[in-house]
Amino acid sequence: MESGTVIRRLAAIVIADVVGYTRLMERDDTGTYAQVRLIRDEVVDPAILSHGGRIVKTAGDGLVAEFTSALAALRASIQIQRQMQTRNATTKPDERIDYRIGINLGDIMVEGGDIAGDGVNVASRLEALAEPGGICVSAGVFEQVHGQLDVEFVDGGEQHVKNIARPIRAYRVTLAKSTSAQHRLKSSLRRLRWLWGVAAIGLVIVGGLVLLFVHGMRPFSAPVSAGASTTTGNSATGRSPPLSVAIMPFAASGGAGADDEFSEALTHDVTAALATSARYAWVVSPSVASRYKGKTLDVRAIGRELNVRYLVEGEVRPAGDKQMIATSMVDANTGAQLWNDRFDLSPEGSPAGRDVAVRQIAKGIRIALFDEDAKRAAREISPVASATDVWLRGALRSDGTLNGDRDARKLFEEALQLDPRHVGALIGMASVIATELYLNPQANREQLVRRIDEYSTRAVEADRHDPRAWFVRAQALALQWRWTAGLQARDEVLTIDSGRSDAYTMRGLYLMLMARPDDAFAELNKAIGADPRQANDGDLLRLRCRLHLGVGHYEKAISDCERSAVLDPFWLTHVWLTAAYGQRGDLDKAAAAKAQVLRQRPEFSIAAFKALNPSDVPAYWEQIETHVFPGLRKAGVPER
């Protein structure tokens, strides 16, 4: 280590090593070194950096990375292992490069740029316990993250490991998709890709459209102060209103006047962004929350005083030459941390950078807020439930199948009986009708499209200032090929909530369906500019893949679709991969991609693709006939 002051802090430590590196080097040292270096550049390093991690040190076969959040550390590790699964799918077993990853949450010593201590040692032992291609985490990590990601955990029990006297409890991460509430919600929205032209892209922007189609609640016209809570909360039971949250004053660790001023502005901006984009939520006004500034927080007492279910805490602190914003959401009933994340700003904390961080924080809160209250609604079924609670149960019951969505439909109808202008229930009705349209071969398309149009119109009429209502309206218009009106509806979203990345992506999709690829690419770049994390979003990558494929850029299409397949293995991604591999002449990979399509859609054929008919623009079909269908035919996809 470099000499200097030793600092101790809590951190999430990730240690990753290549399995059998010595054997691989003995067989082909030059090729192995080059391949590992390429994987670092394309997979490992981007995953760590995009989730806010810092690479502390590297060796030929592995690395040590540090994160401020256990959740971010595990997300990065999952991304690495899933991308490696895709890369290894067509690799011979004796040529595979697999990583083992260990993650621990513990105390570390920091000196210079290096870290050491018991926390690092435990992470190293966990890495050794992981299976090739697997992840092993400590009990501390498990307690922080379980239930928040679409993975399962297998309890490995107490493990006695080298050079550590006490046993450590280890959990192995199962990378298969789980049935967690958040994943069930995401899965239940698959059929809504029809609303965005399923045959063209199959697009759901997770951070935005999950909130659009699932997170719709009774709208409020502005951030709500705590003083109004007695009219909205359940006074008979003493319970706080559904989806109620207070953004507590962000702390400034530096304590300087400028830092304090910045933190105060940040608190106001996050509160305003959440209230604008999540009009269904009960958001305490910043003037009310400000009275807790600088005080030690007793979350249970504050929750009772403000009549809210959740509190969001934040801190602005220096991180090298940047500023870092750490945020978390806690249950005001129990004090348990439910969500946390970190956001980096440039050294000067530029207004543009702050705006991006504000949007990211607000989006994270929206997702966590809905996820937690959806699980609560499923647990606490009351005979005097509100329209919101009934709708929440319907959203959980909706699973993208005909039977599941028919059950959900009954709950959405019940919610609308309680409140005919409930935006979430109106959107929910549109979603279950879309399932019928998508999955029922006997469905009357004209009739169902008319009903989707009706519910989207009612959603806009219920609250013209709710961006989610305009989103669903735009998608209903897309089903009718009313492109100009659809683009205008999309523009209403940005008029209400400027800077929403999913609104730019929606425009990119429309322009793709209108056979305007250059304009579509420009909109996707705007989406990433509004939210840089979208650069690693599986759905945006799928759309970009399709755009490249439509203009004959097969290598670029393959690169984007391979990344998308790891992040979100939707069947349509493999359709584009099949076509691109076929056009490139890589028939082995084309066959493997086709097998993935048929596994999810056994009836898939070129005729079935045509029958989806997402666009009436002749130039769109020229692109498909020139670049997609020939690649599918080369891979052996049947005509019928």
Image (cartoon, rainbow, N blue to C red):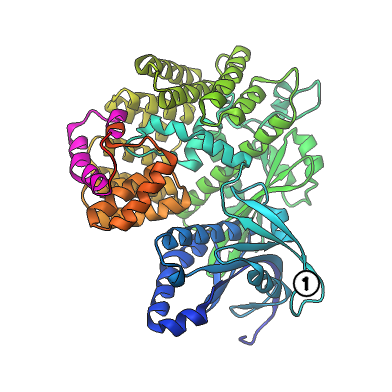
Left or right side of 375 for 443: left
Q: Quadrant of the N terminus?
A: bottom right
Say which residue appears at 38% left-offset and 82% top-offset: 30
Left or right side of 183 for 631: left
Count numbered badges in the picture. Answer: 1
**Would you say residue 532 is visible in this rendering?**
no
**Would you say residue 638 is visible in this rendering?**
yes
* Outermost residue to the bottom: 3
Comparing 178 with 2, the one in front is: 178
- Label 1 neighbourhood size at 10 Å, few (<14), some (14-19), many (20+)? few
Left or right side of 344 for 225: right
Disc 1 element: loop
Q: Position of residue 144 (x, y in %)?
A: 70, 54
Comparing 562 with 42, the one in front is: 562
Instruction: Give the residue type at disc 1.
Output: His
Left or right side of 31 for 521: left
Up/down of 251 relative to 436, above or below: below
* Outermost residue to the top: 417
Query: The magenta stretch spans which residues?
Result: 609-635
Q: Quadrant of the C terminus?
A: top left
Comparing 191 with 322, the one in front is: 191
Q: Position of residue 75 (x, y in %)?
A: 56, 56
What residue is pinned by disc 1? Answer: 160
Q: Position of residue 192 (x, y in %)?
A: 44, 31
- Magenta: main secondary structure equals helix
